[in-house]
Amino acid sequence: MNGATGRGAAAMAALAFATVIWLGPAVAKSPVVIVSLPPLHSLVAAIMGDTGEPHLMLRGGRSPHNAALRPSDLKRLRDATIIVWVGPTLENFLAKPLAAFQNRSAIITLLDLQSMQRLARRAGTSWDQHQHQHHHHHEAPRGLSDRGIDPHVWLSPINAIAIARSVAEALILEDPANSTSYKRNTRNLIMRIGALEERLGKSLAPVRRDPYLVFHDAFQYFERHFALQALGAVSINPERRSGARRLTEIRRRIEQSAVRCVFREPQFPPRILNTLTQGTKTRIGILDPLGAAIPPGPNHWFTLMSDLGAALVGCLGDRS
């Protein structure tokens, strides 16, 4: 699925059935909603609207890879009516607490939703361009372990709609008195997602054939949806430093493939990328899969996606 389908893709996804694991009866009149990551929180906040405000678990750019729960976090989880997270493959710090609270909350595990497009993790740091061009419609099989799934599912407009519908279903079950508001907000959100998808598809069209590298493989859903030409990543694990041999291979790939841009992430220093691109025409850009610098709220996801598109167009489209 890619952006060429525009509003049609959004409309089709809007009809998908969203599965929510319902693990207990309603425990509160007003839903207490906990969301793990800022982009997911944004979608939930848009659906809740004036009926309430979801609590964001990871604020201030905290990474899900090395997060730890504080006593206040545990108390909020204990009191939660609805909990939204990707799954243990990304937010492992939540796995044990959620198992303990599963009898009192509705837990929406995104990687378990039947309506969710799931892509397998790409092997290594060099991806076959021919395969990327001709197999971008293929999803990971449902039997594949979550550890083999790329967890950055929110970077696809199709998945954003699936998330919205799943959350709306859970909210309506928990708070039927506000079902009209939830349904209206969900319809409006889906329309906004479709409009953004169309704008991004048009703006990214001129740079779809331009090769680039990313710091680590966090953008596959965005790349596949909009048919972009990411050739590989600098690092398999962003928390570990790449060795000299690996850096030499990347430098050779940059030169041989005429890579236009290498994109770093804001939380990691640019020193290595400066070394890799020194003396070449390759530029350095910035892509952030979580939008750490974007204020939380219903517009966060839209700003995040727009910023990704603008960064790609700005770097790849610079012909100077």
Image: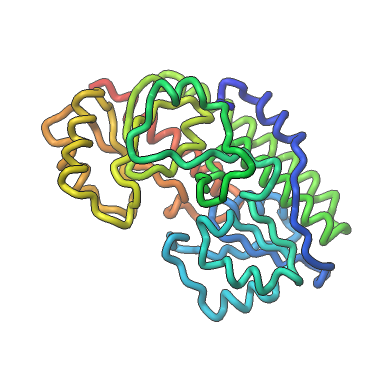
- As drawn, the residue found furthest toward the left would be 279
Task: Answer above or below: position of 128 versus 78.
Answer: above
What's the image's color scheme?
A: rainbow
- As drawn, the residue found furthest toward the right would be 177
Q: What residue is drawn where x is 69% and y is 34%?
A: 191
Q: What residue is drawn where x is 57% and y is 78%?
A: 72
Q: Position of residue 259 (x, y in %)?
A: 27, 27
Q: What residue is drawn where x is 35% and y is 22%?
A: 210
Task: Answer above or below: position of 190 versus 79.
Answer: above
Q: Is residue 105 left or right of residue 251?
A: right
In-front residue for pair 49/140: 140
The quarter of the picture where residue 153 lies is: top right
The quarter of the picture where residue 65 lies is: bottom left
Q: Is residue 122 left or right of residue 168?
A: left
Q: Position of residue 245 (x, y in %)?
A: 17, 43
Q: Is residue 72 left or right of residue 213?
A: right
